[in-house]
């Protein structure tokens, strides 16, 4: 039960984190080397759009800024996306509250608000103490000459939507503007930061990324989502293995506890063993008796553990358990769970049965080695 529940929670955490990362971020990005902008990005778009398994491709801009409201200032990441087709960069419409990606476009009717529009993460809006309709100022890492000397450029934006991904890091620092505004504020003219690509199967990202490098003869810097988040997923995989090993040792100790009662039973039943052997019972049949008893105890415990683990996982899935810090520490705000049937209902039970079987061998062999006369005489 301990193995099933803990590994299911680890799988759920891994799956939930993966779905949020690939949902909000591109599966593959194509940029220039050494952070150079792309001017011929249409060639890249035309080339990758025709490739198999590519569902969306689009340009984007990316940069840092200081967002300031009337109350506070917070450092943010500013993404410029195509309001009509943002899916390649981020699936905005999935996470926006009462808004859609096209709201980033300049209004067609005069007096309908600013042409500079922005989406904020919900946690970021809370920190800035702003709501939809309020204005914020972005201070950019670009200096300009003013009567007061060199000052950072700034631009006022109207908040037209809030979004929540469930990941604190994203919700507290990500902002989105239209591609045109992104190019203007970072003075890119018609250039972009890179091309984002979404696939129909995220697991194909390394393969497709390799094909893109080959297609353009290494002209561009190509990264898949695993490379962009390599440290995080390596840490998660390592943690899963370590937790599995620790819990397996707990199961091993539990299996070894079968040895103690069986050994005591051999001592307690010495006379009966001697009588059985005197009546013609073979060493093999006596060994089988104690192996059967140990396996009965072990298998019964395993079945109860599987059932208990299944019930507990279902309870965790149906009744969300909030994470400490509300997502600030563990990226997500609730305890996720995902049961892997192969591991939970085949690999773990089979390994546990094997451990139980090995645990019965020593007391069973001790019982089989008893001599009938000595067993009856000294019992």
Image (cartoon, grey):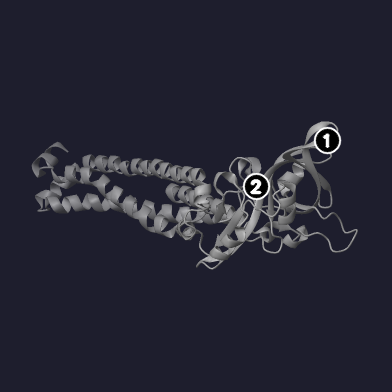
Q: Residue 325's quadrant in the figure?
A: top right
Residue 274 at x, y percent in the picture = 14, 45
| Left or right of residue 229, residue 378 in this image | left
Q: Which residue is mark 2?
A: 170
Query: Residue at left 20%, top 46%?
Result: 364
Q: Residue furthest top?
A: 149
Q: Secondary structure at mark 2?
A: helix
On residue 311, the disc is none
Nearer-the-camera pick, 188 or 322: 188
> Which comes before the other along the chain, label 2 or label 1?
1
Residue at image coords 80%, 45% = 155
Classify 10 Å Cα crowding around label 2: few (below 14), some (14-19), many (20 and above): many
Q: Is residue 57 above or below residue 77?
A: below
Q: Is residue 108 above or below residue 70?
A: below
Which residue is label 1 attached to? 146
From the viewer's side, name the closer residue of 253 and 21: 21
Foreground: disc 2 or disc 1? 1
On the image, the x and y values in percent for residue 341 come to 43, 59
Is disc 1 surrounded by few (<14), some (14 to 19) or many (20+) residues within 10 Å? few
* The C terminus: image quadrant: top left
What is the x, y in percent for residue 176?
Answer: 71, 52
Q: CA distance from mark 2 to mark 1?
A: 34 Å
Q: Position of residue 7 (x, y in %)?
A: 46, 49
The answer to which of 311 and 181 lies nearer the viewer is 181
In contact (CB < 8 Å): disc 2 and disc 1 = no
**Which type of secondary structure does the marked residue at label 1 adopt?**
strand
Question: Residue at position x 79%, y 37% from top?
Answer: 72
Whether residue 172 is visible, yes or no, is: no
């Amino acid at each position: 039960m301990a193995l099933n529940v803990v590994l299911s929670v680890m799988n759920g955490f891994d799956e939930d984190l993966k779905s949020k990362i690939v949902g909000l971020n591109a599966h593959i990005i194509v940029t220039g080397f050494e952070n150079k902008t792309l001017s011929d990005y249409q060639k890249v778009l035309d080339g990758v759009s025709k490739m198999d398994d590519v569902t969306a491709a689009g340009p984007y801009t990316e940069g840092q800024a200081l967002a300031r409201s009337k109350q506070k200032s917070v450092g943010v990441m500013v993404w410029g996306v195509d309001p009509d087709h943002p899916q390649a960069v981020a699936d905005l419409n999935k996470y926006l509250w009462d808004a859609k990606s096209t709201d980033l476009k300049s209004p067609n009717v005069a007096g309908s608000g600013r042409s500079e529009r922005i989406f904020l993460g919900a946690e970021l809006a809370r920190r800035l103490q702003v709501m939809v309709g309020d204005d914020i100022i972005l201070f950019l890492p670009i200096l300009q000459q003013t009567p007061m000397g060199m000052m950072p450029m700034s631009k006022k934006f109207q908040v037209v939507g809030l979004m929540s991904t469930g990941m604190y890091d994203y919700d507290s620092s990500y902002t989105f503007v239209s591609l045109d505004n992104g190019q203007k504020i970072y003075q890119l003219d018609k250039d972009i930061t890179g091309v984002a690509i979404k696939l129909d199967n995220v697991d194909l990202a390394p393969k497709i990324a390799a094909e893109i490098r080959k297609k353009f003869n290494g002209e561009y810097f190509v990264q898949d989502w695993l490379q962009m988040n390599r440290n995080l997923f390596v840490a998660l995989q390592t943690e899963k293995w370590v937790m599995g090993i620790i819990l397996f040792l707990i199961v091993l100790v539990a299996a070894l506890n079968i040895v103690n009662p069986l050994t005591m039973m051999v001592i307690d039943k010495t006379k009966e063993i001697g009588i059985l052997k005197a009546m013609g019972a073979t060493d093999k049949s006596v060994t089988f008796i104690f192996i059967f008893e140990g396996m009965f105890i072990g298998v019964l415990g395993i079945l109860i553990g599987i059932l208990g683990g299944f019930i507990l996982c279902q309870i965790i899935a149906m009744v969300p358990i909030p994470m400490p810090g509300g997502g600030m520490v563990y990226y997500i705000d609730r305890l996720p769970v995902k049961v892997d049937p192969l591991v939970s209902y085949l690999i773990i039970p089979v390994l546990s049965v094997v451990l139980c079987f090995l645990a019965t061998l020593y007391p069973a062999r001790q019982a089989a080695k008893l001599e009938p006369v000595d067993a009856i005489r000294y019992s």
